[in-house]
Image: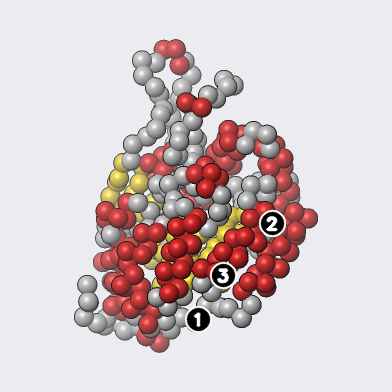
Amino acid sequence: MKEESESDYLKGRGAQLNTHNPYQKHEYVQEHVEGLDEEFQRAPKREVFLEHPKKIVNKVESPDLPMPYSINPYQGCEHGCIYCYARNSHQYWGFSAGLDFESKLIAKPNAPALLEKKFQSKNWQPETISLSGNTDCYQPLEKELKITRQLLAVFLKYGNPVSIITKNQLVLRDLDILKLLAEQNLVHVYLSITTLDEDLRRKLEPRTATGTNRLKVVETLAQNDIPTGVMTAPIIPGINNQEIPALIKAAAEAGALTVGYTMVRLNGNVAPLFEDWLYKNFPDRAEKVWHQIQSLHGGQVNNNQFGDRMRGQGHIADSIHQLYSLSKRKYFAQRHMPDYNLAAFRRGGMESLF
């Protein structure tokens, strides 16, 4: 393997390569560099593809996830988080889980119309729907397309509860709708904050808002009486586990009502992407971190077993859980998110304010 120079590293990208898509028979490969007149694969430019699905509300089957339904207005995510489990789903669209996931983005502009149709159906019973279960609904493309904002307007119109999780301060653009939803107990917002170390954040989640700015989002939402929580996920042993007390303390001070975490698991092609990233960014401890991740999942870097896959197993998982529980008890005693108001649902909707 040729030695990686600093100029070869794609700054601003989490993945540094495209992994093979197992659903495709053919692929482009770089075997004879000397025969190429131009670079084979360097910093990709963003491409946007429009998709018009027949349905947008997905039932969540996983017992590990506390949401009955989800909506994903976008597939692929420009944030580029190297550990993202959603990378594998990009392969269903004919793309790679690697650089393609961060640069070949799919948007669903008919999502608001499909959601409204769902709410008008006589078979729909009000349930909380999560934005997003797969990729960030406030990734940079949302600033241009405003699909998430339109979806929130539909949730408000019909009085159906919605849960949001994001890494982007763009969520504050929709403060007007969020405040109206919160007045009826129809919204929870979660900020995913993995690290407060800015150097690590740039490598781990290169196109996200800084940890400091995400805490400011929590503070602003809390000041506007919008129920807000923080997810410190994933916890990666040897990378960010030592930050747990500081992350939970900072979340509490910003006004969050709850915190949660999951343990890193590297499913499918996320494993080779993460391993490549790990050895390029932390060569001095890469092997140790890799083995610690394996220890969480019975010798593998992934575990599909419901119940264990999000929390891990073994002494490292136990020590992380203990540290997390102690920190949560210290900073979040007597705090909790309010219940959603399922009684506010109006099948006929109301005149839209937007």
Mark 2 belongs to which amino acid?
A: Gly
Which element is circle 1 on?
loop
Residue topped by disc 3 = 252
The residue positioned 59% from the left and 55% from the top of the image is 234
Residue topped by disc 2 = 312
The picture places residue 66, in percent across and down from the top left corner, at: 54, 70
Return the mark for residue 338: 1
In the image, 331 versus 272, the foreground residue is: 331
The picture places residue 159, in percent across and down from the top left corner, at: 34, 80
Q: Is residue 196 left or right of residue 218?
A: right
Number of numbered discs visible in the structure rendering: 3
| Precedes in sequence: disc 1 or disc 3 | 3
Mark 3 belongs to which amino acid?
A: Ala
Label 1 or label 3, whichever lies nearer to me, is 3
The residue positioned 49% from the left and 44% from the top of the image is 202
Q: Are marks 2 and 3 in contact (CB under 8 Å)?
A: no
Which element is circle 2 on?
loop
In the image, 280 versus 276, the foreground residue is: 280
Residue 71 sits in which quadrant? Answer: bottom left
Residue 132 sits in which quadrant? Answer: bottom left
